[in-house]
Image (spheres, rainbow, N blue to C red):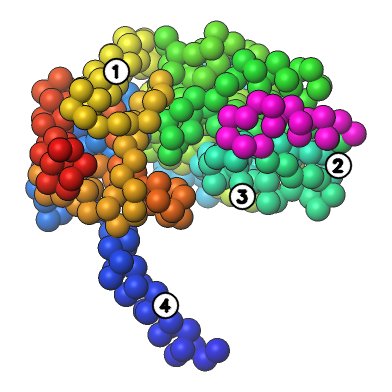
Amino acid sequence: MTRALYFAQLAQQLDALRNAGTYKELRYLTSPMDAHVAMEGHGRVLVLSSNNYLGLANHPAVIAAGQHALQQYGAGTASVRFICGTFAVHRELEQALAKFLHLDAALTFVSCWNANEGVIPTVVGDNGAVISDALNHASIIDGCRLIAKTTRKCVYQHGDMAGLEARLQEQQDAAVRLVITDGVFSMEGDVCNLPEIVALARKYEALVMVDDSHATGVLGATGRGTCEHFKMLGEVDIITSTLGKALGGAAGGFVAARKEIIEMCVQKARPQLFSNALPPTVAASALEAVRVLEREPARVTRLHEKTRYFRERLIQAGFQPLPGDSAIIPIIVGATATAIRISNLLLQHGVFVTGFGFPVVPEGAARIRCQISEALSQADLDTALAIFVTVGKETGLLQ
């Protein structure tokens, strides 16, 4: 294939996406992430699609911590951790995260995607077995692709505990068995069956890893995630999560686990060995976000209340959101083009919420994914609900 033909084919593929109504457009914001943002071409809009679950992305103390770190440490590390790229603020953040989650130690990465890609191959080694929920996040899927060729990869159907046990039975001869699950599944909004997963793992001497990116700061009475939600703090072997959602919203991820696992990740996790450390501004702002959460657990309570309110009112209006306990409320609308059309109509009415379709979710299961933030006021929620009803009637979702 010639270069000219290659680029012509790309152009045709992009035109086909536009003609099908499935082309994704980037929306440019010109103000901080908050309940309301300034969006180019749309003015001020109400945000219902952000991972800013606790409203900390624009919190004054979080911003001030980042500014102070910029002055103290400069713009960045200019190196990977083991050479000369580790600052004292990284240790402070990692100690705070480990304490917050009731685990021995923690290690930060530039994203939770990198954390998953680094931790999975490090933990299972050359002769282990990974057993993963079918709807786990793409970063877990990619992390599993990086394991050694001699390590086995198994998948069980979403939430199927009988299937999980069958996979565990099949892999009893593996040197290490690692069961991996999302805490909150990002496209469904449901929570994993952690008590049963841990019980089965203990029965078959397996390790359990939970990606808690959409649960940290969201689930549990004080926002400690899926383990706290089930009153199981300290009972999971490995937790990965993000600093780019509830904990400040900037970027970064981490793994928390027993000290030996963290030490081995320091020695062997490739994304940590070959990538610069978190910028100190991000580390400091995330650390302050953890401290704000510890000082103000009522933020989590209010988030739970607002999420229940919005879900109940959607149902009363005639929508059928997927059930769940998280701050993610998906409404299935069918085709990808339908989801994008509804999302565009909502934006025209002043509500920014994203439509998701294939390949992010299966064909025919496209959805509008609402995400509730503590930053949203009661008036914001009621305004959004009224607009949802209007657009629902315009598009035939509601009669």
Q: Which residue is mark 3?
A: 142
Count of labels in the image:
4
The quarter holding residue 324 reads top left
Q: Where is residue 391 shown, x and y percent of the image?
A: 14, 43
Tell whether position 162 is magenta. yes
- Crowding at mark 4 (Cα within 10 Å: few <14, some 14-19, many 20+): few
Marking on residue 127? 2
Q: Amino acid at mark 2?
A: Asn
Q: Where is residue 165 shown, x and y percent of the image?
A: 74, 27
Label whose residue precedes the other's in the sequence (4 or 2): 4
Q: Which residue is mark 4?
A: 10
Q: Amino acid at mark 1?
A: Arg
Q: How far apart are labels 1 and 2 at the CA level?
A: 45 Å
Q: Nearer the viewer, residue 231 or 172?
A: 172
Q: Amino acid at mark 4?
A: Leu
Q: How far apart are labels 4 and 3 at the CA level?
A: 25 Å
Q: Which residue sits at x=74%, y=22%?
A: 201
- Confirm or deny contact between disc 1 and disc 4 (CB under 8 A): no
- Confirm or deny contact between disc 1 and disc 2 (CB under 8 A): no
Q: Amino acid at mark 3?
A: Asp
Q: Which residues are magenta?
A: 156-173
Q: Which residue is mark 1?
A: 308
- The residue lying furthest to the front in this view is 399
**Tag 1, which secondary structure?**
helix
